[in-house]
Structures are given as structure tokens and as C-alpha cells.
Amino acid sequence: MRVAFLGPPGAGKGTQARELAREWGVPHLATGDMLREAVAAGTRLGLAAQRYMEQGALVPDDVIIDLMRERLAAADATKGFILDGFPRTIAQAEALGKVLAETGQALGAVVFFDVSEAELLRRLTGRRVCRQCQATYHLVSAPPAKTGICDKCGGELYQREDDSEKTVRNRLEVYTRQTAPLLDYYRGHSLLRTVRGEGPIDGIRRAIREAAGDAR
Ligand code: AMP
């Protein structure tokens, strides 16, 4: 299973990827999570990425491509993966194709999560994330049992700095300008599968399984 999840911020890629990665026994490779860890740890990568992330801009392609080239070479990624939030530009998509081809691999499907802009704004501005396990909640539609505490691991919930309304609008613009062209790119490679990303989580998950070629 070599799949990339494509879609705007707030489309539900991370929520579905975490669950399906467990189900399929493949790693969930989320560039946003990797970058946030690097920022928290104060590494060189984190310092290079932080100001872009705070503004809702994309981190430069060369930084992301080096990061993912290294990550994809790790033993756990050789038998499959779910990419979440990567690639986000045509240059990243081309680099990904090359990196995989070097080891005789290729993407099997790119699953596009189709969600309306009004719903994205609602989800992102109400989103809360667990610092420990990255599980996500929504203040109104999916609150935790105990305010501010993760149901799954007891970790502390926080609002991502880039989930403020102003930065969210910028991220959505950046998506439209820099990432949405990937729809045509992957359509041209006959890899694009569209899933409607609104409605019950289980129904969306079934649609993703089907789109990714999981026959179960
Ligand atoms: P995410 O968690 O996927 O919403 O990513 C959070 C932030 O990390 C983005 O707004 C970007 O600043 C940065 N980022 C994550 N993935 C990428 C990528 N593939 N290319 C460039 N920047 C990225």
C-alpha cells in the first residue's frame, strides 16, 4: 500500500491516515507532524521551518524533499506508507516520483479529500490537538469527555498556532495556489481518486479503503 492523501488543511487527512496506517500496517508519514516535532525539539530543521509554519506558508521544497528522501529510505517505509501533507507542490511530486523510482517503487493511488471551504474553516478554527498522540478533537462537534484532556492517552490538548482564523485563511489560499495543481498532475498520471470528505468518519474511511484499492 503506497498511498498519498491530498487535500486542503482540515480535510481530515491526518485523522483517517492515523487509523488506516494501523489497519494496513504501514507508517503514517505526515510532514506537518515531523516539522512540528522538529520545532519543539529546536533542531536545525525546526529552526529553518518555524517562521514559514507560523505564517501558514509552505516550507521550501528543498528542505521538505531532503526530509522525505531520508524518511522514505528507512526500513519501515520500504513495504508501504501513507503520505499525509506531502507532496504539496509539483516540484515535491516530481521529486517523490524520482525517489520512489530509484528503488523500483511507485505510488498506487492519490486520494483527494473533497471538503467545502466553509466546512474547512469551521473544522480548523475549532480544532484541538493532543500534544502527546496527535489525536484531534473539535470544540463543538467532537469534544473530549474532559475539557482539555485527550480521551485516548490523557495528554494535554492545545490549539495549533496556525489554526487561528487569519492563518487558516492564508493556509487555504496557499493550498489553492500551490497544492491544488497536483489534482491535474495526478489525474494526468491516472492516480487520482476523489473521496467526499464530509459526513460520518466511518463512511469516509470505507470510501478511502476502496479508493486506495483495499478490497476488504
Ligand atoms: P500540516 O500539519 O500538514 O497542516 O502542516 C503544517 C505546516 O507545515 C504547513 O502549513 C507548512 O508550513 C508546513 N508543511 C507541512 N508539509 C509541508 C510540505 N509538504 N511542504 C511544505 N510545507 C509543509
Image (cartoon, rainbow, N blue to C red):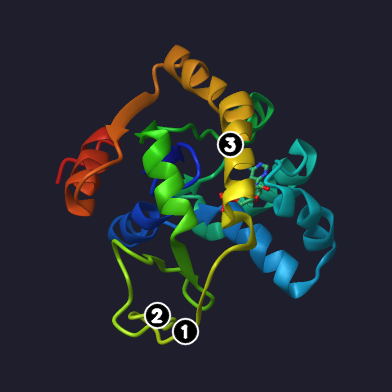
Q: Nearer the viewer, residue 78 or 112?
A: 112
Gap in Å between the C-alphas at discs 2 and 1?
5 Å
Gap in Å between the C-alphas at discs 2 and 3?
29 Å
Q: Secondary structure at mark 3?
A: loop
Task: State the residue at coordinates (32%, 28%).
Answer: 194
Q: Are marks 2 and 1 in contact (CB under 8 Å)?
A: yes
Q: Is residue 102 left or right of residue 134?
A: right
Task: State the residue at coordinates (48%, 68%).
Answer: 129
**Where residue 60 appears, x then y in whole percent?**
78, 40
Q: In this orientation, does residue 102 appear?
A: no
**Where residue 215 appears, x then y in whole percent?**
16, 40
Gap in Å between the C-alphas at discs 3 and 1?
30 Å
Q: Nearer the viewer, residue 195 or 171?
A: 171
Q: Secondary structure at mark 2?
A: loop
Q: Is mark 3 within 8 Å of ligand 1?
A: yes
Amino acid at pointer 3? Pro
* Residue to which mark 2 is pinned: 150
* Residue to which mark 3 is pinned: 87
